[in-house]
Amino acid sequence: MKQLGLALHNYHDTYRAFPAISYDHEVNGGDEARHASWSWGTLILSQLEQGAAYDILAPSRPDRLHEAVTKPAKLAVLQTPLTTWRCPSDTGPELNSHYKINDGSGTAGNRKELATANYVGVNSAGDVDRANTHNGIFVPGTNVQGNKRWVVAMRDILDGTSNTAMVGERAWMQNGVEIGAAVVFGHNGNADIENNADYNNGFITVVGGGKPHINTIDTCGSGCNDNDGRQGFSSMHPGGAQFLFGDGSVHFLSENIDDNIGGGTDSTYERLMNRYDGQPVGAY
């Protein structure tokens, strides 16, 4: 995770901001069943000493991700496992068979399995959200909810980088349920939790939220999808998960951390996810 932290800081040094969740969507995210967008993981490849891969992928028009997967040279890169993105203790496959990526045809059988990741960006102290209310470091990029180029910079982390989580772990399996970990390079469409009935598309492929408790699936009782934990953070480590903070440090957060799901930012875990709540974090 420290390598990701260094890469994100180097990206910030170059562009004066952290990358958005993803880049160059179709207008309003496009069709969830056909389109796919490059994610922040692709944008920092050069900072991870993967410049050759970045040059082959060339993540800009005319090739969006759903077009890139149809081209053999690009698909070969997209299906190359990257150890930087994997937790050694995780049991998931090298290629992600849970979150398959669209090829533009609209045919589910044509979706491609890309390299699996165990690390996702922090989008919100609550649900993964594409509106203007997200309070994490990773926010939507172009053509989402009217945001043409909205990104977060150091100056926007008002609580301080040492008090704000930036990236967290997500496991392939949790409590006997396949939650699918994440994908390095991108996601289908741009759905958030409220607009994603099957939890198999959208931003949760590359970012997470603080609403579910760490290492849990059924998080909020009646009226909540039991798969809600897919948008959260988890690991195969006993008792918690690792998080990369905005200052580049890595911390293990216990699954028993003070965490009050729902409502405002009123618990230690939620305060660590929220970059501008203005409240003291306390011990964790």
Image (tube, rainbow, N blue to C red):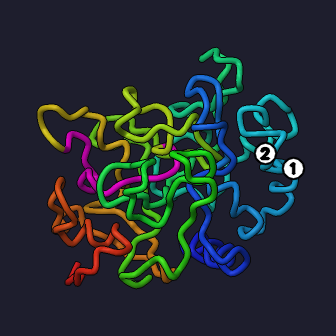
Residue 2 in the figure: left or right of residue 268: right
Overall secondary structure of the magenta section: loop
Q: Position of residue 199 (x, y in %)?
A: 40, 33
Task: Indicate whether 83 appears above or below 184.
Answer: below
Task: Give the residue at mark 1.
Answer: 56
Instruction: Label 2: state its secondary structure.
Output: helix
Residue 24 appears at what percent x and percent y?
69, 47
Residue visible at 40% across and 33% down?
Answer: 195
Of badges 1 and 2, nearer the viewer stands 1
Mark 1: amino acid: Ile
Q: Is residue 203 left or right of residue 25?
A: left
Marks 2 and 1: in contact by CB < 8 Å? yes
Q: Which residue is mark 2?
A: 77
Q: CA distance from mark 1 to mark 2?
A: 8 Å
User: Residue, x 30% and y 44% (percent of image)?
Assistant: 229
Q: Is residue 139 above or below residue 97?
A: below
Q: Residues within 10 Å of mark 1 (few under 14, many from 20)?
A: some
- Which quadrant of the figure has residue 54? bottom right
